[in-house]
Amino acid sequence: MTVDMDLLSKYAAHIASITRAPLSDPWMYMEKIQECVKEPRTKRKFFGLSEPQIISGEYRTVERETEVIGRHWILRELYSHSEEIVDDPDFTYRSEENHRRKRYVLFEDGTLKVASTWTNERTFVQHRTEVVRSYERSVSPMDAYQVMELDRGFEYQTLNNGKTEERGVFNRQQVNYNPGGGIRSILTDLLKATPTR
């Protein structure tokens, strides 16, 4: 059996139009980036006059907040954090961390989507410490495969293979054997929710 995506989309749009469940605020994502920050300094001129001039700059870590998605209803949220010590003869110490977060969501217009963020942070130590960060985020329409992911249960777990430790909430064993039954149940639950005051 497969998921009837057209029928599911109509049901999702119907739920979005009548539910009184409170919406989640826009999902904001914090990035740390290296920017060259130039500061004005006063430079003396003739006759005792002076004026500010930008004469130098330095790189600093700056936090920048970006919107991943606007207001929405969260149908399910998964996340994970992994840490790994990497064997690298070129460095005294090297580690790598990954942070992942994934949301299955319903928008006010009735569309079903999957939004995700990923942060990779690599630390290198050799005479000095250097941290390199990478960021990714994506938003895409929910497909039949992702719909069936919600037919599975989910739980918090810690996974360790001796080299890498990963902690988070993951989709686990299948609990609904009717394809798409999981998301339909979640959408129906939105009808039972009451608005916040």
Image: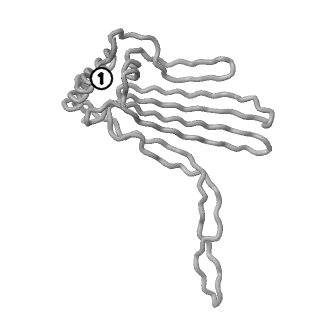
Q: Residue furthest bottom?
A: 47
| Residue drawn at (30%, 23%) of the image | 5
Instruction: Name the element at disc 1.
Output: helix
Q: Position of residue 175 (x, y in %)?
A: 39, 10
| Residue drawn at (80%, 44%) of the image | 127
Q: In this view, does 120 lie to the left or right of 112?
A: right
Alpha-carbon neighbours of circle 1 within 10 Å: few (<14), some, or many (≥20)?
Answer: some
Quadrant of the rendered structure where residue 18 is?
top left
Q: Where is residue 40 in the image (x, y as percent from the top left)?
A: 59, 70
Q: Quadrant of the N terminus?
A: top left
Q: In this view, does 33 lie to the left or right of 103?
A: right
| Residue drawn at (35%, 39%) of the image | 25
Residue 51, placed above or below residue 109: below
Quadrant of the rendered structure where residue 2 is?
top left
Query: How many labels were placed on the picture?
Result: 1
60 or 87, nearer to the observer: 87
* Residue at the spot of label 1: 5
| Residue drawn at (62%, 54%) of the image | 60
Residue 186, placed above or below residue 37: above
Q: Position of residue 113 (x, y in %)?
A: 36, 31
